[in-house]
Image (spheres, grey):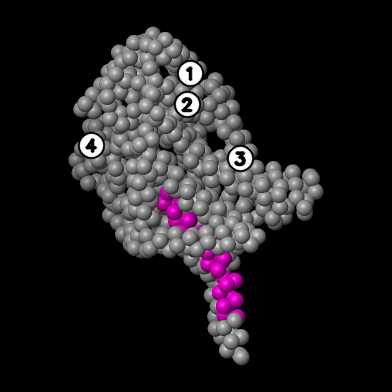
Amino acid sequence: MHTTLSKKDFSRYLPFLLLVMTVFRVLAGLRIPYMILANQRYDDRLLFENAYDLLSGVWLGSYDSYTLAKGIGYPLFLVLAKKLCLPYSVLLSLLQAAGAWLFVRAVSVRWQNPYGQAILYLLLLFSPISLTLLVTQRLYRMAIVPGMVLVVFSSMIGLTLRKELPLKKQLPWAFLTGLTLAFFWQIREDSVWILPFIAVMTVWNVGYVILVLHKKLNTKALLIHCLTMLLPLLLLFGANTGVSVVNRIHYGVFLNNDRTEGNFAELMSLLYHLDSNTRTNPDIWISRDTIVRAEAASPTLQQIQPLLDSYTEDWATRDGEIPGDHFSWVLRDAVQDSGIAPNAVSAQTFYGNVLSELRAAVASGELTEKTDGALYFSSQSRGVLPEEIPGILSDTLQNIWKIAGYTDCALSSSAKSAGRLSDIRRMESFASCLTVYPTLSQFQAADYDSIEDETLYDFNEIYSSGMVSLLNKSNAIYQLLGQPMFLLALLALCVLTVRVIHGLFHGDTKDLELWILTCGILLSAVLLRFGCGLFTAWFSEDMQKFINSFYSCGVYILLQMFKYLAVITTAASLQPIRKQYFRNSHKEKEE
């Protein structure tokens, strides 16, 4: 009796304990320093400039070649924090807390152990990838990727597991999935990797409603249930259309962004397909020879040729070539500084004319497209030869194993900002966060006329060191247990797979849905890391650190979700067997 009472008392105080830990997580976010790279004109500062304009009510401001280069998701997040009068770090921590809570709520219809749910919430709340230098501390869009991945996948899981419940139970999850998916789509231009999971689960949900629930529903109710299952994709389409409409109103072009849509995107895709007279290594997506031949074939491109050649020279490495996708930014710089395209319409016209001229050159034989059988997984990157795929896949699986152990997940109290002091201070003030300033010798004299002490701005490093050390110790526990837990999850998935196959032979599909969800999350992690491997294959040695804990940050949270869902699902599936075993054992003892 006393033991039962103690458990009830603990259950009563459990929400309070979780609230305390959530408040601590928020305070921890306030205490760590944030790295402001104000010198990154194409990345960090660009998104903040967009946020400044959004807050001022002028959409993305006056047009230049970079205005539509990136999605508006992160600037909207910055503006939301400002509108809510919250420091950026608080909203970032609350996003992680919301994702953790949603995941627990999503699986609660199949797993109702309050103590297990509390542990699950805390494990996700303090996820190492949400406490990592290049993700959390850098004021850039990757910071919200792990939290939003957690929110979107949790929402879709919640909707899937509730499709047999009354409509009022389904609609909140359907709306939440659609709205968060639409926002996630606007964070990065390569968010398409999330679509296979959403599409497969949507087909599964709609098919289940039509094939299984049609006996319980009339025609009208059946149609409403199907539309509810389709709502996430409908909201995604509607939101993307809405952004394109606003861009059309402000800039005269119907585009979400001009990196993956419109004439610039098509032009870059064509350039990646053009053959070269010189042999280049795979790191060179567009060779110098290809650029020269394209200029010769396009009178329109020749209008900016002096600037284009000059900037190409500036961006080139020692061998005279430009690696990766850097030429796309070289082209933007040349168009911007030439003044040839003062608005979005003229820019689309310019790129469209170049595109038409290059296509005509290909048709006439002046230029040729590659015939090496390469596969183009994206219009914004080079083609991949079939024989390269096994190597990339092997690299993907090796890094999946590393990521499962939370490698590279650590904070730093000395994450120094970079750029002009005025730009850093402006971004710091906008986000209401702490930053560690670079040494003053890196600034121009105008920034610190009478300041001689180069350690003047380093007090934030000392102030944050204690909390950073504590959180890194927390990450170390995850790193110790991460890979063993991953192996356990894979074993659990194998057991669950056997259970599903056995069930299918006996007409039992109870575990099939959770198996599909679990496999979908794991395969999404593999797909995302595979895509990162394709895009970053050209990275130099000093850039390798960015591949996992930066570009692949979404993989960390996906693998974490996979681990927990696989173990929970398998344990719940085996519970009837365990109960039957104990029941039989009890009978044997009585006999």
Q: Quadrant of residue 542?
A: top left
Residue of label 1: 348
Is residue 566 one of those drawn in magenta?
yes
Rounded to the nearest angstrom, the CA distance separating label 3 from label 4 is 48 Å
Does label 1 or label 2 sit earlier along the sequence? Answer: 2
On residue 258, the disc is 2
Query: What's under tag 3, amino acid-wise?
Result: Leu
Is residue 557 one of those drawn in magenta?
yes
Q: Disc 3 vs disc 4: which is toward the camera?
A: 3
Cβ atoms under marks 4 and 1 closer than 8 Å: no
Q: Quadrant of residue 308?
A: top left
Residue of label 3: 233
Q: Disc 4 vs disc 1: which is toward the camera?
A: 1
Mark 4 residue crowding within 10 angstroms, few (<14) / some (14–19) / many (20+):
few
Query: What's under tag 1, amino acid-wise?
Result: Gln
In which quadrant will I find the C terminus? bottom right
Q: Is residue 436 above or below residue 322?
A: below
Residue of label 4: 442
Along the viewing direction, whichever of 457 and 41 lies nearer the viewer:
41
Rounded to the nearest angstrom, the CA distance separating label 2 from label 3 is 22 Å
Query: Is residue 110 visible to the viewer in this orientation of the structure?
Result: yes
Q: Is residue 249 above or below residue 449?
A: above
Does label 1 or label 3 sit earlier along the sequence? Answer: 3
Residue numbers of the magenta segment = 555-583
Rounded to the nearest angstrom, the CA distance separating label 4 from label 1 is 39 Å
**Helix, strand or loop status at disc 4:** helix
Mark 3 residue crowding within 10 angstroms, few (<14) / some (14–19) / many (20+):
many
Q: Give the residue at the far bottom of this rendering.
A: 591
Rounded to the nearest angstrom, the CA distance separating label 1 from label 3 is 29 Å
**Helix, strand or loop status at disc 3:** helix
